[in-house]
């Protein structure tokens, strides 16, 4: 039997749908009842019989830091996909990020070892990979993380989670790690999900930045995860990026599908840096959540290009064209907006 943590998230819900195609015996962890509706929503995009598919999953309510609950979820499990994570860039959320991303992952690793799990796949992020001073030099799996950089708190805790996974390999657990770029998929249009980018474009953006980062289709992510788990590959990590795009180009491509005007003005570095400083001051004075952190502003302005050739060569994998992904996700967003 297969266990999926984070089954109600973007990657987890699409992964469950993918695994159900082969009638695998599936168990998935969830935290609150209202999140289960999101999974059914995702399933409904791709099947009219989505309720039947959803009911094939054995759902277990569990917290990543509740060992008795996790132990119950691990019974009769052979393979684990660890997709669960907390995503936040709010400085005040650092302790919670550590609790879920690092300590929660350590618990999953410990239970994998205790229950003699055959193999684990961990969903990490390109945020845990270093970058070069030369922005034109491609970033690959060998590009080392630099703890001295001004890394986001999310990146720090995901890197800490990776260390727990590597610790598991030293204790005999076979693992694979995937490091996706910004994952584009439907069903999650708010919060820190990438779906919020489509909402923001639809609502209208005045400014763009010329920062560059990696993007990937959610279906590419789950297909790669499944292939890696079925393969003999172990104790390796793989960057999953189909295209390196500037935020400007992403906004233009998305706005075209959504049939609205793209942003026309460039947000110069001085403007972006001024905004995060004012936002920091407002947060200190008024106690309100941060809208733009220093690390987030750096990401919007930085040019970071990723090399996914290791994965492409290892699995002979062809990523989907990013234009097709943007079109598909944009149309599903419009469908939800008009329903």
Image: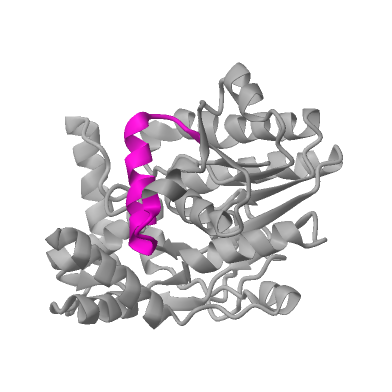
Q: Nearer the viewer, residue 6 or 102?
A: 6
**Residue 21 visible:** yes
Q: How many labels, in total?
A: 0
Using residue 248 as the reference point, say whether residue 102 is left or right of it. Answer: right
Name which residue lies at 29% across and 81% down. Answer: 253
Q: Position of residue 7 (x, y in %)?
A: 49, 43
Screen quadrant of the C terminus: bottom left
In the displayed structure, would residue 66 be above or below residue 177? above
Using residue 43 as the reference point, say whether residue 137 is left or right of it. Answer: right
Name which residue lies at 13% across and 63% down. Answer: 203
Report if residue 222 lies within the magenta region: no
Q: Which residues are magenta?
A: 29-50
**Residue 268 visible:** no
In the displayed structure, would residue 236 be above or below residue 247? above
Q: Position of residue 64 (x, y in %)?
A: 55, 29
* Quadrant in which residue 247 is drawn: bottom left
Using residue 281 as the reference point, say whether residue 109 is left or right of it. Answer: right
Q: Position of residue 101 (x, y in %)?
A: 55, 37
Q: Position of residue 29 (x, y in %)?
A: 52, 35
Report if residue 30 lies within the magenta region: yes
Name which residue lies at 46% across and 29% down. Answer: 96
Using residue 38 as the reference point, say whether residue 79 is left or right of it. Answer: right
Name which residue lies at 45% across and 62% down. Answer: 183
Screen quadrant of the N terminus: top right
In the displayed structure, would residue 120 be above or below residue 60? below
In the displayed structure, would residue 71 be above or below residue 207? above
């Amino acid at each position: 039997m297969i266990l999926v943590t984070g089954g109600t998230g973007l990657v987890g819900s699409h992964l469950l749908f993918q695994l159900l195609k082969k009638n695998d015996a599936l168990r998935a962890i969830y935290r609150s009842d209202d999140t289960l509706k999101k999974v059914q929503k995702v399933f409904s995009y791709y099947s009219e019989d989505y309720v039947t598919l959803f009911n094939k999953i054995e759902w277990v309510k569990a917290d990543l830091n509740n060992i008795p609950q996790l132990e119950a979820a691990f019974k009769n499990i052979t393979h684990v996909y660890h997709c669960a994570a907390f995503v936040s860039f709010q400085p005040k959320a650092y302790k919670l990020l550590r609790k879920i991303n690092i300590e929660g992952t350590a618990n999953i690793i410990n239970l994998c070892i205790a229950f003699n799990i055959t193999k684990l796949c961990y969903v990490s992020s390109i945020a845990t990979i270093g970058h070069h001073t030369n922005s034109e030099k491609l970033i690959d799996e060998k590009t080392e993380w630099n703890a001295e950089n001004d890394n986001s708190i999310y990146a720090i805790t995901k890197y800490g989670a990776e260390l727990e996974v590597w610790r598991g390999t030293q204790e005999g657990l076979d693992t694979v790690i995937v490091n996706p770029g910004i994952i584009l998929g439907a069903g999650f249009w708010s919060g820190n999900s990438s779906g919020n980018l489509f909402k923001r474009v639809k609502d209208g953006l005045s400014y763009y930045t010329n920062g560059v980062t990696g993007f990937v289709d959610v279906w590419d992510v789950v297909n790669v995860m499944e292939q890696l788990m079925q393969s003999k590959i172990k104790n390796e990590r793989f960057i999953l990026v189909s295209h390196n795009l500037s935020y400007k180009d992403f906004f233009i491509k998305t706005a075209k599908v959504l049939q609205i005007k793209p942003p026309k003005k460039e947000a110069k570095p001085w403007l972006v840096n001024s905004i995060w400083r004012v936002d920091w001051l407002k947060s200190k004075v008024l106690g309100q959540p941060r809208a733009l952190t220093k690390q987030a502003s750096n990401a919007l302005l930085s040019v970071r290009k990723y090399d996914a050739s290791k994965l492409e060569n290892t699995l002979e994998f062809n990523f989907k064209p990013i234009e097709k992904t943007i079109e598909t996700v944009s149309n599903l967003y419009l469908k939800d907006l008009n329903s």
